[in-house]
Every structure is written in structure tokens, then in C-alpha cells.
Image (cartoon, helix red, strand yellow):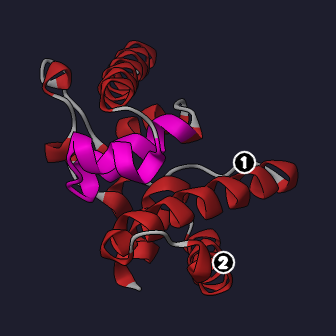
Amino acid sequence: MDAVYRLSFAILADEADARDAAQDTFVTAWRQIGKLRDPDRFDAWLQRVAVNAARMTHRARRRRGVREILASRIGGVEDLPATASPLEIDARALEAALGRLSIEQRSILALHHLEGRSVAELAEILDIPAGTVKSRLHTARQALHAALLAEAAER
């Protein structure tokens, strides 16, 4: 339960939305458990369900209005890509930079850096090839770096 909530919160950065997404994850998992082909892969399957629930919650939230991502609530600057090291990063700049990323970019960064999932695990969770995972991780890191640079330039 905690892992699903943490992942949802890392993606959505809102406690209420994360609770809703976590609840939706477990309801969907309960309804769809019969479609699970390999019970040994339950964790990866559940995380895929959680990412999809967070995406759906995000779409619903966009219709209600946008909220700011609170990076200070999902982790520290130690989770940032090495390319961001020349910047003097504070929590507000990180929050704003994360807010500039797409939901897909935040999802893959959260799964990899916050949840500690490997490329192979991400490929399974997201149901995409490992090469695509690497490419998306690279793109998300570049986008975060660019967003951090933009935040630094604006300050």
C-alpha cells in the first residue's frame, strides 16, 4: 500500500490525488487480477496499474485546474541527474522544474530514481522495450535539466 501511494504521490504531488489514485489502483487490481498472466510479476503489474491510475487522476485534475508539484515531498536533490550539479538547486526551483515536465516524464523519473526500479523493471512495468526505457529516461533527465536551467535563469 505504501509503495503504491508513494509512487502516486511522486507522480501527482498532491496528497488527496495520490490517495485517490492509490485507491483506484487497488480497485482496478482487484477487478483485473484474473488478467494477471504471471503471478510472479505481481509487483510490476501493480506498479503499471498505479502509473495508469495516476495518469487518469492527472487527466481529471487538469480539468479541475493545475496544482504545483511539491518536490520537497517526494525526495531531495540527491535524486537529480548528475547533469544538474552545476546549478544551485533549492526546493522551490526543483518543484517548478518538475512542474514543467510531462506526466510521463515525471512517472519514469519517479519509478527509476524514487522507487529504484531498474531499466529491465521499468520495461516490464511500462510494457515497453528496454531501449525505449533508456531513451525516455534520457529525455526526461534532459527535460529536467533544461527546466532547472530555465528556473535558474528566471531567478
**Depth check, front residue: 72 or 119:** 119
**Depth check, front residue: 7 or 154:** 7
Residue indicated by mark 1: 66
Q: Confirm whether the magenta stretch covers residue 121.
A: yes
- Residue plotted at (85% across, 56% down): 64
**Depth check, front residue: 144 or 118:** 118
The residue type indicated by label 1 comes to Val
51 vs 123: above or below: below
User: Which residues, given as a range, are shown in magenta?
Assistant: 104-127
Q: Whole-percent x and y of residue 125?
A: 41, 53
**Depth check, front residue: 30 or 7:** 30
Q: Is residue 82 left or right of residue 36?
A: left
Q: In which quarter of the image is the C terminus?
A: top left
- Residue plotted at (20% across, 23% down): 84
Q: Whole-percent x and y of residue 145?
A: 32, 20
58 vs 131: above or below: below
- Sequence order check, earlier mark of 2 and 1: 2
Q: Is residue 118 visible?
A: yes
Residue indicated by mark 2: 28
Q: Quadrant of the N terminus?
A: bottom left
What secondary structure is marked by label 2?
Answer: helix
